[in-house]
Image (cartoon, rainbow, N blue to C red):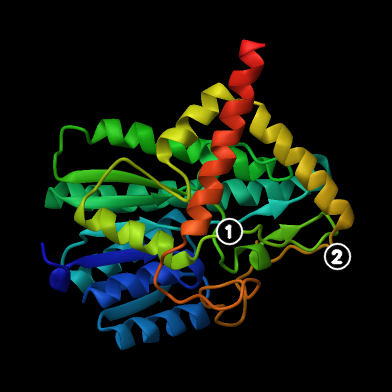
Amino acid sequence: MKYSTRRVVIMGASSGIGAATAIAFARQGAQLVLGARGKEGLEDVAWRCRQAGGTAEIKTVDATDADAVAAFARFARRTLGEIDLWFSNVGAGVVGKYADVPLADHHRVIETNLITHMNDAHAVLPIFLEQDHGIWVNMISAGGFVASPYAAAYSASKFGLRGFSEALRAEVGNRRHIHVCDVYPLFVDTPGFKHAANYTGARMKFPPGVLAPETVADAVVELGRRPRATTAVGAPAGALKLSEFATPHLAAAGMHRFLSVWSKKAKRTPVTEGALYQPTARADGLYSGQRGRHDGSGGNNKGLVIGAAVVAAALGVQLLRKRS
């Protein structure tokens, strides 16, 4: 199917990766239906999509509400006729030591990062099965392979999301035109940190080599052309998978040491729930604002090199330990 007729639904489209992906598909002439909690962000992204050459309809939806997601899927199908690709991109985070974060916030992260994606799949898979074609793209993150101290609920949600995808992929394995595709980026320069709840008292800042959201968007667009089960962005997928088994504790321990030092030395900031329970009252765009301007090309070789180097270093240390 040519991109001039491709019909795409993006949940979590009001900022960051979702917004960048909507614009990337619009440049290919796609017809889009965009969903998120924040109306202002959706309107901004829809305008950008139309400027880029696509069509875009929007609908505010709370992705934690299964009935609302089902109604959104029906709206999208009526609008588009059929759904060729559905991108599940809703996500949230809480930063802080597990015992310092209210349990309600941990529950909210699980609900936002895992249950919303399950709601999406439950709404769109029957449509795919009836059509006998469709691509479900599941945004997970490298956190689905490498645990994140100071973000325990986030880790639980991402590990769970990876297992959920693998189970679905097996269930539709005999339907050759239906695909379940997972995306695992490293750090991406989006408003995500600004939206996150923060109980550390330290101002969050992206590390060097952070990926541009267009880099991830390009990977999602490519899945529309050539679906594949696993796509890692910023480090080789094989290295991420291998690191989970070769260094099950090393990466998490190293991350904990880094975060412990960071939380003491970083600039102080008040405790905040961020956008965990309510959307922001403005359009936040694609970027965090921390890294300067991006050229919009989607390329970020520095991010790829750094991500690969981190994984390779962890593997090398573990192998040396085994030999000694």
Which quadrant holds the C terminus? Answer: top right
Q: Nearer the viewer, residue 99 or 22?
A: 22
Q: Is 256 above or below relative to 4?
A: above
Q: Nearer the viewer, residue 121 or 225?
A: 225
User: Image point 32% across, 79% down: which residue?
Assistant: 57
Which quadrant holds the N terminus? Answer: bottom left
Please give the count of numbered marks on the rendered protein: 2
Query: How would you rate the neighbour count of disc 1 (Cα within 10 Å): few for under 14, some for 14-19, many for 20 or more?
Result: many
SS for tag 1?
A: loop
Q: Position of residue 42 (x, y in %)?
A: 45, 78
User: Image point 51% across, 60% down: which residue?
Assistant: 211
Disc 2 residue type (three-letter): Lys
Disc 1 residue type (three-letter): Gly
Q: Is 248 above or below relative to 164?
A: above
Q: Is 229 above or below relative to 68?
A: above
Q: Position of residue 184 (x, y in %)?
A: 45, 47
How far apart are labels 2 and 1 at the CA level?
21 Å
Q: Position of residue 149 (x, y in %)?
A: 71, 40
The first of marks 2 and 1 along the sequence is 1
* Residue 157 in sight here: no
Q: Is 124 above or below relative to 255?
A: below
- Determine which residue is flagged by label 2: 267
- Determine which residue is flagged by label 1: 209
SS for tag 2?
A: loop
Q: Position of residue 159 (x, y in %)?
A: 53, 36
